[in-house]
Each structure stands twice: as C-alpha cells, then as structure tokens.
Amino acid sequence: MRIVFMGTPEFARTILERLIADGHALCGVFTQPDKPRNRGRVTPSPVKECAIEHGIPVFQPVKMRDGTALADLQALQPELVVVAAYGRILPKEMLDVPPLGCINVHASLLPKYRGAAPINWAILNGEQETGVTIMHMAETCDTGDMILRKKMPVPPEMNAEELFLELAKLGSDAISEAIEQIKNGTASRTPQDHENATYAPMLSRDLSPIDWSRTSTQILDQIRGLIPWPCAAMQLGDKTVKVYRAETGGTTNETAGRMKVVKRGIEVACGNGESVVITELQPDGGKRMAASAYLNGRRIAAGTYLN
C-alpha cells in the first residue's frame, strides 16, 4: 500500500520500521523540525533518521495550515496516511487527501488518556492495564472512531520508559493488523464513548516534587511515571535530587518525609504509615547512580537520619 507516515519520537520510529518491514510503499515521511538535543546539538528526530536510512523523502513543515504541508501531501498521492506521536494536529483538508483516510496509533485504551502523555499518566494514576488504539483520525485530538484496541498489563515495577518500549511493539502489531483490515475492507468504525473520555496533558517540572504526605503507592507511581523526564525529585539536605528508582519499604511510625539510611538506600516515611526506599538517584549536576553509592561516597552509615 502507498503510505505517508507522520511521527517524531522513538515510539513512532518503531511503527515506521514495521510498515517498512511489512513491505508497504512509504512515499514520504513527515516529522517535526530538527531541535536542539544532547547539550544543544541540533539533531534529527528518530523518525527522520529512520527515513533517511531507508531512502524515504522527509518533510518537516513548521506550520500545518499555510498550504505548504497540504501541497506536499497532495503531491505524494498516498492511499493512506499513518500517524504515530507526530505532535501536530492535521487540518481537515489534509485528512481528506488520502482516499483510504488517515489513521492514528495512540498509546492508550481510548477514550481514556487522550492527549500528549498517555503512557506517563497511566502509570501516574496507578493503572494496572493499558494498551494501544488504532483509530480513524478526526479534526479534534484523539476523538476519531476506533478500528481496534490491544491491551497489556502494567507490571507494578515497570516505569514509563520501559512501558513506552512495550507499547511501541504492541502498536506495531496493531497497525499491521489494522492496515490489513483496511486493505480487505473489513476495518470497523466504533465510535468512542466521549462522556467517559479522560485526558493526559503534557508533562512539566511542576509534577516533579515528591509530597511525602501521599501514600507509598502514589509516590512509587510518581517516580515510575516521570521517567525519563522530568523525573520525580526530593530535597536531600540543601540539594535537589532526581529519583529514578524506589522500592516498597515497610510499615513505619516515623513522620512523613523522615529519611533514614538503610542498606538498600534511603528509606523515607510516607503519609500512610508505610515507607519507600530510594535505590537510584541523580544529584544536581552529578551522574545517575545507586543511592547506596551516593551515601558511601559521603561516608554516611546505615542507621543515620538525614533530616
């Protein structure tokens, strides 16, 4: 099938690679303009890198409504447009170009978690199950009729970065199946239950500070859900420290936020009479490391209270 693909991050690259592996004719790739990454170096998106490797023409429109992107899409004459984490809303005139329509790979079980960060918010909210949805695209974000959904459990120890990889694999299987249905004329159009829709807004650093008055489960979900950015953060003395991994501690009579050095790392009392143990962290301006290594480097012995 003659397809134009639109996407930007690593999640989208996995989907693009599956389309290539399935033998589709990728006539063009749309991705966001190159941005400064890795200490200010301007680098291409993962999708652009993949397209270049496979000799697929790349388009990086700055705006979607000035006519340029529309003209490029019309010139490519795709039968179908596939979108995955592009980060742009397509205007109606672009949605109308391909005769078989535009379909989207969304990393949640719609109508739950429409929006920019569904993977993170599923973990932040303690979901035990998530998945991917393939849908026909509409003018408003993530509201189109569904073709199919695939589910997977969310293990309690899995962080957002790890779940991202698993959902990319699941999404590549789902898009392959959906395109086959479109080709055969068997693809369904199941309307979403808009009244039960929830949203997953963009992440910000405002979500980082840990509130130790919350339950241990909520704090562990916060730590898992904010990997790799912006990361949960706590105060350690006069330093702000990013928290990358933590484990369940035990019951405690300590006041919420009281910190004690233990063999595994830093045990912190939470608001529900339980504790968590910080096992991996990154001090401000330093490297990511085991909490035990951080403490050993400062010669802080087990049993020491840190506040």
Image (cartoon, helix red, strand yellow):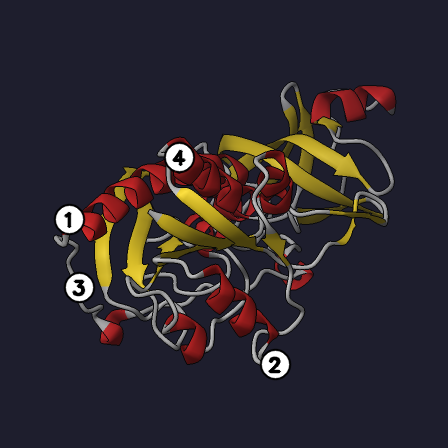
Which residue sits at x=36%, y=65%?
A: 98
Question: Which residue is under mark 3?
Answer: 189
Q: Secondary structure at mark 2?
A: loop
Q: Is 92 above or below relative to 271?
A: below
Question: Which residue is under mark 1?
Answer: 184
Give the spatial CA distance, label 2 vs label 4. 35 Å
Q: Toward the viewer: 70 or 301?
A: 70
Left or right, 66 with respect to 284, comes to left
Is residue 201 at all visible to an observer of this figure?
no
Which residue sits at x=23%, y=60%?
A: 146
Q: Position of residue 111 (x, y in %)?
A: 29, 64
Q: Residues within 10 Å of mark 2 (few under 14, many from 20)?
A: few
Which residue sits at x=80%, y=43%?
A: 38
Question: Which residue is under mark 2?
Answer: 66
Q: Secondary structure at mark 4?
A: helix
Of the numbered discs 3 and 2, the one sitting upstream in the chain is 2
Quarter holding the C terminus?
Answer: top right
